Image: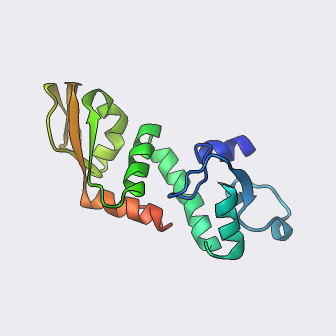
Amino acid sequence: MKRDVLIESGYRCAMPQCGAHVVDIEHIEDWAKVKKHEFHNLIALCPNCHRLVTKGDIPKLAVKQIKANLSVLNHRYGEIERRVLQLFADRPGATNITIDVALELAILNLLKDGYLIQITNPPTQHGLSLPNGAAISVGSGPVLYELTKSGREFVDRWVAAKDLP
């Protein structure tokens, strides 16, 4: 179960804007109250975030939502997509990212969900159409992608520990 909790958070602190690599497995509802180790009640936290939760600076309700959001993120998006979302979470003013078109398939779900849109075309390309009408390019070279309004709203909801759509 410990391994599953660590995998869920990417072996990092589960707090969206932390990501520290030194983590412990913590009970969301205190062990003294529940007296059980259950996956839904365990979360990976660094010592600093754990202290903030214990002091009440980060409310338990927020920690429960962060845990629920981890499930949404991990089931909907791959590792590269989660890293792109993390980049935008860490840089609230950022709106663009350049990614080699060879990695476009690795961000396909962000494109399909409308959270990223392609702004520039790669130097060499062949187009593919997605079922939702969006197009992607197959080829090589850097491509500029823009975080859409709905993409920013998704990132902001994640960072604020609100329910993800």
Viewer can see residue 1: no
Asked whether, in this view, residue 111 is left or right of residue 28, the answer is: left
Rendering coords of residue 62 (x, y %): 57, 70
Quarter occupied by residue 97? top left
Viewer can see residue 3: yes
**Residue shown at the point (37%, 53%) measured from the top left:** 88
Quarter occupied by residue 156? bottom left
Rendering coords of residue 161 (x, y %): 50, 66
Indicate how the structure is coloured in the image: rainbow
- Seen in the picture, residue 51 relative to 16 is either above or below; the reply is below
Count every numbered label the image shows and give the total.
0
Rendering coords of residue 26 (x, y %): 73, 58
Nearer to me, 17 or 158: 17
**Residue shown at the point (58%, 43%) measured from the top left:** 10
**Residue shown at the point (40%, 42%) measured from the top left:** 81
- Seen in the picture, residue 135 relative to 40 is either above or below; the reply is above
The quarter of the picture where the C terminus appears is bottom left
**Residue shown at the point (75%, 55%) measured from the top left:** 38
Asked whether, in this view, residue 116 is left or right of residue 56, the answer is: left
Rendering coords of residue 134 (x, y %): 19, 42
Nearer to me, 77 or 54: 54
The quarter of the picture where the N terminus appears is top right
